[in-house]
Image (spheres, grey):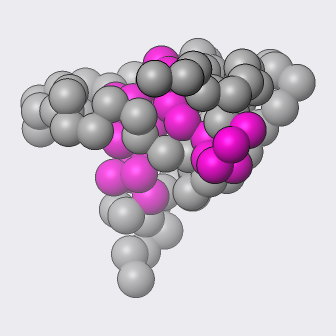
Amino acid sequence: MAKKLGKVLNKCTVDKTLPLDYLKVLQGSLKTLLPENYEKLKKSILKHGFIYPIFVWENVEDAQIYILDGTQRYTALNKMKEEGYSIPQIPVPSARMHSLPD
């Protein structure tokens, strides 16, 4: 288990928050977070707090919550959690809908 390093502040106000573990990546490995970009994002999150929500789609059919916008922030927060940072619940404005037919 990683040691506790610090706490990420949530400075974003929305109607709903969720634990980081509830979110699923929709894009797969379409985007990667390079180590130097991770360090920049981590530094920004620690300095300013979490100021932008992660937009999600709540799929009614499979009861999963997929990330529409914020995959790199999600990836960075997961890595920070592994390093020992305390991650608050994530602000998530969401769209709740069924999948489109093929």
Examine the rendering and report whether any part of residue 54 can be seen: no
Q: Is residue 71 magenta?
A: yes
The picture quadrant where one finds residue 101 is top right
Q: Residue at x 35, y 41 (%)?
A: 75
Q: Which residues are magenta?
A: 60-81
Q: Where is residue 66? Give x, y as percent.
A: 54, 36
Instruction: Please give left or right for residue 87 compared with residue 81 in the image.
Output: right
Instruction: Please give left or right for residue 101 compared with residue 89 in the image.
Output: left
Q: Residue at x 56, y 57 (%)?
A: 21
Q: Is residue 66 above or below residue 31?
A: below
Farthest residue in the bottom direction?
1
Q: Where is residue 4? Give x, y as percent.
A: 48, 68
Location of the N terminus (image quadrant): bottom left
Q: Where is residue 36? Give x, y as percent.
A: 11, 30
In the depicted view, which residue is nearer to us: 4 or 57? 57
Q: How many marks?
A: 0
In the depicted view, which residue is nearer to us: 49 or 96? 96
Q: Where is residue 55? Give x, y as percent.
A: 60, 21
The picture quadrant where one finds residue 39 is top left
Q: Is residue 63 magenta?
A: yes
Farthest residue in the right direction?
15
In the depicted view, which residue is nearer to us: 76 or 57? 57
Q: Residue at x 68, y 43 (%)?
A: 61
Examine the rendering and report whether any part of residue 58 can be seen: yes
